[in-house]
Amino acid sequence: MTDSQSASTQGTNLIGLTRADYRGLPSTLCQGCGHNAISNQIVAAMYELNIIPEKVVKFSGIGCSSKSPAYFLNRSFTFNGLHGRMPSLALGALFADTSLHGLGVSGDGDTASIGIGQFKHLIRRNVPMVYIVENNGVYGLTKGQFSATAEKGLTLKHEGTNIFLPVDICLEALASNATFVARSFAGDPKQVKELLKAAISHRGIAVLDLISPCVTFNNKDDTIHSYVFGKEHEVRLHDLIFTPARDMLTVEDFEEGTARDVELYDGSVITLHKLEKDYDPTDRQAAFRVLEEAREKRELLTGLIYANPDEPSLFDQYKLPEKPLNRLTEAELRPAKETIAEVNSWMFS
Amino acid sequence: MTQSMPNVVSETVQDRKMIVNDFAITFCTVNGSGSATANMTVMRSIFKMGVPVSGKNIFPSNIQGLPTWYTIRVNKDGYIARVEKDDIIVAMNPATFLKDLEYLVPGGVVLYSDDIKQTPTRDDLIYYPMPVKKLSRGVDVPPQLRDFIANMVYVGILAWLIGIDLEVIRYALAFQFKGKKTPVESNFGVIKSSYDWAAENLVKKDVYRLEPMQATEGLIMTDGNTAAALGAIYGGVQLVSWYPITPASSLPEALIEYLPELRKDKETGEQTYVVVQAEDEIAAAGMLVGAGWGGLRAMSATSGPGLSLMNEYLGLAYFAEVPLVLWDVQRVGPSTGLPTRTAQGDLTEVYFMSHGDTNYVQLFPASVEECFEFGWKAFDIAERLQMPVIVMSDLDLGMNQWMGKPFVYPDKPMDRGKILWEKDLQEMLQKGQWGRYLDIDDDGIPYRTVPGNLNPKSAYFARGTGHDEFAHYSEEPEVWERVLTRIGKKVETARLIVPKPVVHSMEGAKFGIIAIGTADPAIEEARAKLKEEGISTDYLRVRALPFTAEVEEFIRAHERIYVVELNRDGQLRQILLINYPQYAMRFRKMARTNGLPLSARWVKDEILAQEAKKS
């Protein structure tokens, strides 16, 4: 049993906060919406990781998913930005204080259409933050239009039949050189939570493609974004357990050859317990292959698809002072008075 | 040497009085041929001889091969507006040669490369051949630099012709090449040998010459984009997000050049700033909004098309009350327009930017020293008002070289506005209440916290949707109306803190002139010419929107006001009409957009024409 688990039984975590300190407002999304299940796991993951809520900054774009940051982490700053353009907002804000944890929540409508450019450029820059796509294949707030991740052949009430192939969030992320790519299912909360913890601890962009059924507009049993389909067709790449760096002594020993570890930059470890086949999530080629195979077989493939924990993050590319940029004072920001003469001399004075 | 050039203007010209320190030289070259260094060398040399000078680069949207013109105006009285006629041309481009001749005044000078074979169409000009190939061939430079060096031939011959001091030229070259001996000496070698060739082989028949003055002592010379970047550095800029676009790119590029000099710790190498080249202007705007919200001094620079892309994010910044600074280095629109030509065509776009009701602060610099000043001041205004400030420069100011007064160190401490850190918030909560959008001081401006503030009461949810004073989501009609009305109050606070207009009056003025930015030099010169004809004028140069009280006073005091600007529809006039409908009949439109800076002649003639029609 880890420290965090023992702490939770006493009603507070290691930093003395209760679960209530991580909660948000009551959700206004539909009863049974996958997004609510994900919000709950965000609360649980942050609580169990003992993260100070004020050290988290939430971002979102526009859509049902993007409303959800109001429903968790009330004590964290949040910026609900423009449709598909949360990545640039997050990048700018996170430079203000690079010790903060960035948490972006988007949807398939927000990310895979207008947002695809900013999504890929956020990844390309390896901005250290968690980027969740609550993926349900449909536009909810505008009442049931196709999104770009909708399966070809999907029929919706007012829209007819979708004639285009879907955008695959994980493939797009991989192609953009993402350093952490995972897929999970709102109906598999334990896996969602473990992946969230790992994503939060990753130093770089962590893309979580979370299939999150829309119970109102796209939840027919035979469609790939539904609960029933997910329950029936989920294929886990592995069972995974996240162990924070400070709990390293308590890591369970698995029988030789049955598990593999991925150590993150901060020393925490994701232990992947082998299921049907061994899968190496540091092999980018293999990641492309399993995603393609899953698509062909119409399987909901879940787990840690790819991780490269050692790539420098955006912040590593700049030599910033330890003091957050937004706390620098006038004396630290305005060049001294005597420099102005030299500047004028550069101007051919 | 070509024999086809007529040289019929003879005795009469020699007898004419010399014209000293009052003429315009245009260099007619091919884009990408490296002529910029040669042209700058001439301009800097004249400047260092103490003679007032200005430069206008008329260039195509092209990397290499299309014609380009650089005009240097020399004027002992310090007038620096564009002139419409040339006194001297340096003809290096056969493709435009005959057309270039048309712009010369009678008795004007043609220095032409002797590989131009066309027969000129005018016999009232003075022609001097330049054996460019021959004079650059003898020089010991790598072959790939030969074309660039060839431009120095005309520098040397021109120096002989009008009397530029060779030692001053060497000084200007040393500045250009940052003191590197080899390029200075190889370029100077060509200039010297060309000068000597001219002295031996040409006979001066024209009337133009330079004489040293003391009129530029203590002045600097730079472009507006560089000045803006340096001003921003002294304003403590922390995040620059940008996307390349002419004519704005050289502003962030100047930041990239100078930030490490001024804002990077020499020992630790730590930097107090971040520059990010975004994937487009939309992302650049998003980064600005994020950084401004995060408590950083954030800025970008763009031009028309980029501004259009940024609209939605700037509207969000207005409503979510995020400070940021954007430089709009204006070019000719609509659409791609004339990307390398100047205009003041974005005023109304910025005035009405984004959907719904908005207001922004616009600043209008007219000189390099104002670019520097507004460079730092814009941050103080943005953070004080918690709203976007857009600095409206233009291609003429941003990319051309201008004489200017030396930059002045900020005369005020930074104003970081109403920002609360942990203790500040604690104290405020002990005294009463805090809401992110609660107007405690009744000036329309609430107090803000920023991410990283660890006070458990500090966090709030920023959004573009309806919210109440405590940043809670709300669709209540009265809440929406109350919050938007309160934000609207900021305009009145803005009027008190934005730069006031500059007013120049003459006794007995018959009418007023209102203008912004780079219309200034042409207006000042036109006013002097009108004065010579017995017509006195008053002139107010607006430096900011919203208008301050002085603008209305000026309008009230004048029955007729010419609103002079570089666009088609008279955008400044439109904004004046909206603000002062009671004076609507007083505003006369004097708007023009042809991609070129205004000339004093046009301003004067247009005023006289409208004055003649007024009754």
Image: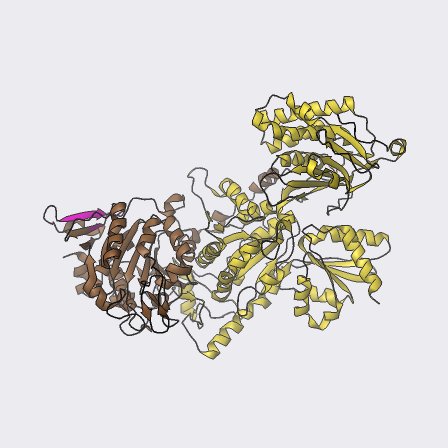
- Say whether residue A141 is magenta: no
Residue A301 location, quadrant: bottom left
| Chain identifier, colour brown | A
Q: Is residue A281 above or below residue B358?
A: above
Relative image position of residue B243 (x, y in whole percent): 50, 50
Q: Nearer the viewer, residue B494 or B330?
A: B330
| Any part of residue A44 in sight | yes
Q: Is residue B494 above or below residue B603?
A: below
Residue, x 61% and y 33% (percent of image)? B176
The answer to whether one can see residue A187 in this image is: no
The tint chain B carries is: yellow
Identify the residue shown where x is 39% and y is 44%: A317
Give the x, y percent position of residue A143: 37, 73
Viewer-closest of A276 and B188: A276
> Quarter of the image containing the C terminus of chain A?
top right
Residue A198, compared with residue B99, is above or below; it is: below
- Span highlighted in magenta in the image: A253-270
Magenta span contains residue A264: yes
Our reading of the magenta stretch's main secondary structure is: loop
Q: Position of residue B595 (x, y in %)?
A: 67, 51
Q: Quadrant of the N terminus of chain A?
A: bottom left
Q: Is residue B72 left or right of residue B285?
A: right
Query: Could you tell whether B135 is left or right of B452 in the image?
Result: right
Question: Hey, which quadrant is residue B361 in on the image?
Answer: bottom right
